[in-house]
């Protein structure tokens, strides 16, 4: 069956919990996790709802392969209407929490309403309690997990929780599990905070059984793991260097957004790269990187475990940061580093730790600091206002502002609004490097044209994980396309978007797709799940999920004009590197993309499309 | 030739494939709480260590059992719990110095690693070679080879 067929519904206003059967018809059409949770959400909330009001709902959802031996089968997603964008929000996390929730017997947890005082949810298999969390309010993610493990007298519970930023409503607050894995983007943590919900604490001992064809499942997952192991990216690049393997690659092709996208190459990239993480430091002779870690069931193990330099100014008096913990991934190294022109890798690791410790998205945070630094250099923001001199390249400004944001102090409160609101507040909305209010990740839309379309049309605002065309345009997976041309990109983006929607709904990690095609995932689903899971069905399902999200956004008030990039990327050409002279051709790509999608010129799915997808 | 499980913590990524393989082999379900091998993730050092029964020759658990429910599998040296004999007294769990035999409340019996009858599922599932099933007399062979390599293959 792969699904537990049970949903836990929790109403925080009434303080009630109940078990419901999973709608198996919907599971057949939307699979699980991202697709299925979104189906529940869009069926139950008004698209125009204020994301931080009690009428919004927030869903923790696993997929049918979560908690199985399929490689990377440990993912869960948090689905809600996001406060950063006002669009659908769906943030995916690894670690061990997702599998634990499934082992406790739940496919998903739907949270409704708002508690009158801070609470957390305790789940031990069928035993579910809404418990007082007033003593946890004001605690960081790390303190919360430690406290809950101690109070439950069970080191084996898994915790998914918010830090102080989620409580304070930082619009890109994350939900963090296992100390440093996060449902990171779009401010899902702020939604939990708005509901006075501090944490989910889970212990599951029921396991996942009753697969449709267990023997075939073991055989096929074993074969597919072999493909991951033998692939250069998933078998060598990612385990050895993590996602940071990209730092030098992306910089060399001139697609490294630098200093709030003013430049496309960062002269300090080498100093903050994967290679730098491996090198012994001058101070202590040790490398920042300790080792790599897999999430639940993951045979790739791209995760970085690092130790900061104890003599670095940020931590010299704070031994609590000296231990091993989550290290720099490429997106964070970019956003905290290149986006601000900061090349002090220890400062980046410090900022990264604080993002984990207090639960906020390093991409949106770092990119917002990029805007702050540009406004500072323009003289719009001053030292007095920010609390520190903040030119591009200032590690001191970065680490000062990460502390302020984590604690909700001073200018950190403004930084917590994200770049769109911040730039609007200071009269320069054009300086926010975002789409639909969500900041760009680490690929410049001028140097990699497909990524521009990816960002402009992503249903959760700018995001690389909705259609990672870097695979094709840079790495040549599954086929190499020219990153500098717009030609063929609408079809490429659509194909990646639809396939990724299926991966995100399965319980697996999208990083498997460096080695696996959807046709490698299909037999794993077929062996696990009852019924027919043909490629045709999965292709259509991906498209259905994408259009369902789109319809929600349209109903929430998004239109054609929201599928756009900031003027900088359309008018200021790349200054250097292989993409020198290029701007984004987004305006050329959008009409073709709409047509391929079966949408009208305003970006609305036509009646025919809606009918074809069974929406 | 007798074989034994050999663990190299430096290769472990804490993916828990071994735990799932163990529970699936023995109970037909993916359920880490039923696994006889456990991976310990020491957050502050980054160390990840799989740990399970080493099949002591003079097995404390076997000697402590009052009903002789733990017996030696002569083929592979495993000390195997016979559930139909086990009375769930838990004395073996006290006797074992390493904690690798444990009570299962759901069955009222104890469980421990039995080497899967000579083909341990955890070793087969481990993607990094952190858990291997090797000649019991030569568990140090790989490490010896590494040092021999250092000794003999140094650049001139």
Image (cartoon, rainbow, N blue to C red):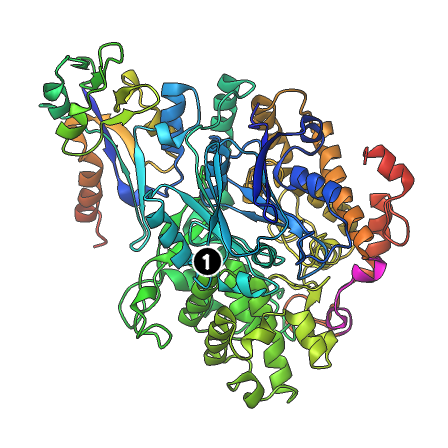
Q: Quadrant of the C terminus of chain A?
A: top right
**Residue A62 shows in the view:** no
Q: Which residue is found at the position 49% from the left and 22% from the top?
A: A219
- Residue A104: percent from left, percent from top: 47, 33
Q: Which residues are magenta?
A: A558-571
Q: Which residue is found at the position 41% from the left and 56% from the top?
A: A144
- Residue that mark 1 sits on: A134
Residue A36 is a magenta residue: no
Q: Secondary structure at mark 1?
A: loop
Location of residue A276 with respect to A605 vertically, above or below: below
Residue A565 is a magenta residue: yes
Location of residue A57 with respect to A536 vertically, above or below: below
Q: Quadrant of residue A455?
A: bottom right
Q: Which residue is found at the position 39% from the left and 42% from the top?
A: A157
**Residue A480 shows in the view:** yes
In the image: residue A156, left or right of residue A404: left
Please report, as a chain letter, where disc 1 is located: A
């Amino acid at each position: 069956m792969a699904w537990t067929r049970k949903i836990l519904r929790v109403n925080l206003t009434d303080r009630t919990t109940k078990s419901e059967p999973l709608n198996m018809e919907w599971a057949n059409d939307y699979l699980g996790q991202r697709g299925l949770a979104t189906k529940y959400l869009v069926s139950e909330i008004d698209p125009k709802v204020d994301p931080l009001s009690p009428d919004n709902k927030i869903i923790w959802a696993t997929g049918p392969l979560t908690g199985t031996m399929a490689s990377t089968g440990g993912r869960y997603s948090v689905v809600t209407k996001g406060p950063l964008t006002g669009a659908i929000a769906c943030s995916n996390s690894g670690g061990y929490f997702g599998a634990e929730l499934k082992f406790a017997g739940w496919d998903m947890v739907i949270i409704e309403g708002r508690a009158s005082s801070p609470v957390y949810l305790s789940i031990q298999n069928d035993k579910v309690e809404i418990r007082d969390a007033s003593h946890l309010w004001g605690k960081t993610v790390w303190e919360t997990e430690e406290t809950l493990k101690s109070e439950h007298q069970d080191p084996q519970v898994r915790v998914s929780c918010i830090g102080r930023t989620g409580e304070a409503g930082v619009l890109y607050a994350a939900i963090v599990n296992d100390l440093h894995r996060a449902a990171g983007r779009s401010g899902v943590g702020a939604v939990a905070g708005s509901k006075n919900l501090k944490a989910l604490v889970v212990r599951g001992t029921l396991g996942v059984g009753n697969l449709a064809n267990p023997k075939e499942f073991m055989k096929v997952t074993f074969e597919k793991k072999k493909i991951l192991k033998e692939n250069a990216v998933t078998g060598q690049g990612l385990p050895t260097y993590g996602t940071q393997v990209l730092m030098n690659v992306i910089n060399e092709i001139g697609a490294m957004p630098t200093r709030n996208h003013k430049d496309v190459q960062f002269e300090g990239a080498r100093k903050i790269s994967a290679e730098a993480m491996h090198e012994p430091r001058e101070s202590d002779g040790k490398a920042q990187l300790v080792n790599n870690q897999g999430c639940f069931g993951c045979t790739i193990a791209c995760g970085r475990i690092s130790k900061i330099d104890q003599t670095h100014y940020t931590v010299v008096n704070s031994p609590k940061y000296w231990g091993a913990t989550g290290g720099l991934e490429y997106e964070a190294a970019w956003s905290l580093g290149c986006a601000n022109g900061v090349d002090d890798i220890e400062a980046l690791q410090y900022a990264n730790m604080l993002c984990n410790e207090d639960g906020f998205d390093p991409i949106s945070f770092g990119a917002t600091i990029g805007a702050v630094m540009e406004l500072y250099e323009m003289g719009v923001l001053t030292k007095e206002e920010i609390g520190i001199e903040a030119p591009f390249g200032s590690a001191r400004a970065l680490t000062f502002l990460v502390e302020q944001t984590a604690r909700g102090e001073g200018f950190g409160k403004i930084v917590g609004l994200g770049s769109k609101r911040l730039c609007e507040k200071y009269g320069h909305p054009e300086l926010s490097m975002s789409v639909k209010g969500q900041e760009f990740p680490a690929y410049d839309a001028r140097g990699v044209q497909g990524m521009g379309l990816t960002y402009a049309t992503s249903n959760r605002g700018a995001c690389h994980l909705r259609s990672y065309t870097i695979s094709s345009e840079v790495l040549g997976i599954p086929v190499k396309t020219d990153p500098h041309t717009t030609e063929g990109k609408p079809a490429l983006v659509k194909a990646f978007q639809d396939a990724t929607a299926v991966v995100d709904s399965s319980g697996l990690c999208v990083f498997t797709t460096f080695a696996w095609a959807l046709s490698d995932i299909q037999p794993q689903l077929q062996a696990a799940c009852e019924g027919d899971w043909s490629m045709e069905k999965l292709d259509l399902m991906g498209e259905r999920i994408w259009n369902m999200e789109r319809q929600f956004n349209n109903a929430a008030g998004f239109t054609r004009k929201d599928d756009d990039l900031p003027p900088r990327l359309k008018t200021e050409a790349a200054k250097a590197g292989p993409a020198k002279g290029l701007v984004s051709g987004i305006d050329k790509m959008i009409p073709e993309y709409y047509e391929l999608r079966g949408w009208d010129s305003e970006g609305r799915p036509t009646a025919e499309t809606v009918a074809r997808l069974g929406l | 030739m007798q074989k034994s499980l050999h663990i190299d913590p430096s290769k472990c990524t804490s993916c828990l494939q071994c735990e799932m393989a163990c529970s699936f082999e023995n109970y037909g379900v993916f359920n880490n709480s039923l696994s006889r091998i456990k991976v310990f993730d020491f957050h502050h050092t980054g160390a990840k260590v799989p740990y399970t029964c080493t099949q002591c020759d003079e097995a404390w658990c076997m000697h402590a059992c009052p009903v002789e429910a733990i017996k030696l599998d002569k083929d592979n040296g495993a000390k195997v719990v016979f559930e139909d004999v086990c009375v769930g007294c838990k004395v073996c769990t006290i006797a074992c110095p390493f904690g690798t035999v444990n009570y299962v409340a759901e069955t009222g019996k104890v469980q421990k690693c039995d080497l899967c009858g000579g083909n341990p599922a955890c070793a087969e599932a481990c993607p990094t070679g952190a858990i291997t099933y090797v000649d019991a007399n030569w568990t140090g062979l790989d490490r010896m080879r590494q040092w021999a390599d250092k000794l003999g293959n140094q650049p001139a």
